[in-house]
Image (cartoon, rainbow, N blue to C red):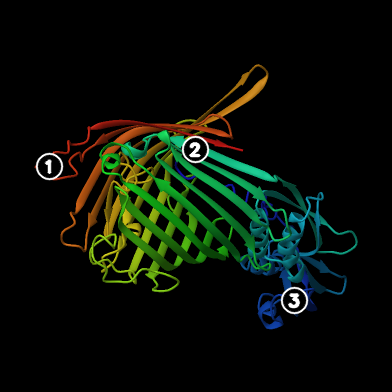
Amino acid sequence: MPPQPSSLGAGLPQFRPLNAAGALPSVTIPIRSVGIIGATAFPASQLDGLTAGLAGQSVPLARIEAARRSILDLYRQHGFVLSSVSAEIDNAGNVRFIVTEGRITEVKLSQDIGPAGTMVLRFLDHLTAERPVSEASLERWLLLAEQVPGVSVHAVLQPSPGDPGALVLIAEVSRAAVSGLVTADNRGFRETGPEEAVGVLDVNSLTSFGDQTEVSLFHTSGGTDNFGQISEGFFIGSSGLRVRLYYGAGQATPGGLLRQIGYHSFTTVFGAHATYPLVLRRDATLEGNLFFDGFDGKINTAGLREAADSLRTIRLGLKGSAEDDWLGGDRTALNNITFGVSKGLPILGASADGRPIGVAGRAGERIDFYKFNGELERVQTLFSPWDQASVALRGVVGGQVTSDILPSAEELYLGGTQFTRGFYAGQVVGDNAAYATVELQLNTGVSFTLLKHDINTAAQFYTFYDWGETWQNQKTDPNHRLESGGVGLRLGLTRFLELDVEAVHRITTQLTPKADSIAPLSETAIYWGVVARY
């Protein structure tokens, strides 16, 4: 299924620019002295430069207003959106610019949501230590509060009586103790499907560490491929650092020719993932991650072990997103970028290099490999054909680069739902690979009332072209090129249920040499998918 648009930041206050000041009377005032009161965010020398030339002069009222606006603009330019500036002039001609620096003096929760509320307050209490409080800080700590599993947050700011500039932040919170996801489609490998399903159950924030226990199960039709995983995630401290520990295991007994030769595979995975938000704004994010992944895979045929790989891999990466309006108006765009470097480590029971084929998964594979991965995505709104509808263009390029012969589990898998559609995930693999996608989208919705219930549906019609190519470092392994195109519909029936339908034309149908007895793929394929959320 395509990634769902993030709702992160929906609960943040909206900060809008002040309207332009109205016309001022044409009055000239003799100024005796000028002072600025209440400003702590900037040095006096910087502020005095904004009022230079006023004292000892007779100046129009508009010039005094311009100086006030200059001070206010300085605060706005530095993100102090809750601060204000007023001007007072006494009968003696003394001008005082009074700066009220907006600050959060207290944070409250609208209701008791158990231990999860403690984690929310740990984040939001950072705001009380900053004077004046900036928009960047407000967004960072509120967005982190929204990331506490199962918790929704909507922020309301209220003035504190009798204390100018002081604000009370009331976090309107709720908590879902349990959430889940079930997805099913027919995109699997023919001999272990093609029907496949994934079920995910999350238990959210039982403690004050913003924890989440997740159990997931992958299952294919006929029970030919089953995999289960359990993970535990939690925050460390109150800076946003999050750690996730996981363990999973599964086995596959495919049908067809593979069953005839007694093929049976076993897989175990485990590891620890750490992520930290380097930048966290409403319109831009950048996350750093450090992963350690363990993989143990074994393949038997006719009861005899054919190959086994044990990998221990450390990964360092960045993941970011940013919105822009380069085309102006309502033609906004969303950009996503990921980059990562992976290094195989010969530790903790990892397999050795130099093992012969029949013991190793691939001849000449490097367990202590290096590889680099990256992906760029842009979704650009083009125009609105009618009310509540938009046309957008999505483009993706990505790939993997390495000079090593990789273990099979570390090759880049082409196919699946996101790129090189029309082929199952892993139908073509490569040490080095590149892929690209161009997708034209029509986004619209239909709202109606049925049996006194409001029904709101969201539909995305799309057409696409996909390309992918692999280059192997093992000379005896073939390189491949995949191309496909098609049309599809992603239909959000409710906020809990989505239905996907896709028709694909395979431009590439011959994946093996024509001399082989394996028939080419059909040129067309129809795929379906269902996602249910709880």
Determine which residue is flagged by label 2: 183
- For the residues labelled 2 and 3, the Cα–Cα distance comes to 54 Å
**In the image, what residue occupies the spot 28% across and 36% down?**
256
Q: Nearer the viewer, mark 3 or mark 1?
A: 1
**In the image, what residue occupies the spot 18% across and 36% down?**
520
- For the residues labelled 3 and 1, the Cα–Cα distance comes to 78 Å
Name the residue furthest left: 515
Sequence-earlier tag: 1 or 2? 2
In this rendering, would 195 be left or right of 13? left
**In the image, what residue occupies the spot 64% across and 59% down?**
144
Determine which residue is flagged by label 1: 516
Residue placed most toward the observer, 364 or 390: 364
Name the residue furthest bottom: 45
Q: Nearer the viewer, mark 1 or mark 2?
A: 1
Callout 3, which amino acid?
Thr
Residue 43 lies, in percent from the top left, at 69, 81
User: Do we see residue 6 in this rendering?
Assistant: no
Determine which residue is flagged by label 3: 40
Q: Circle 3 sits in a helix, a strand or a loop, which is it?
A: loop
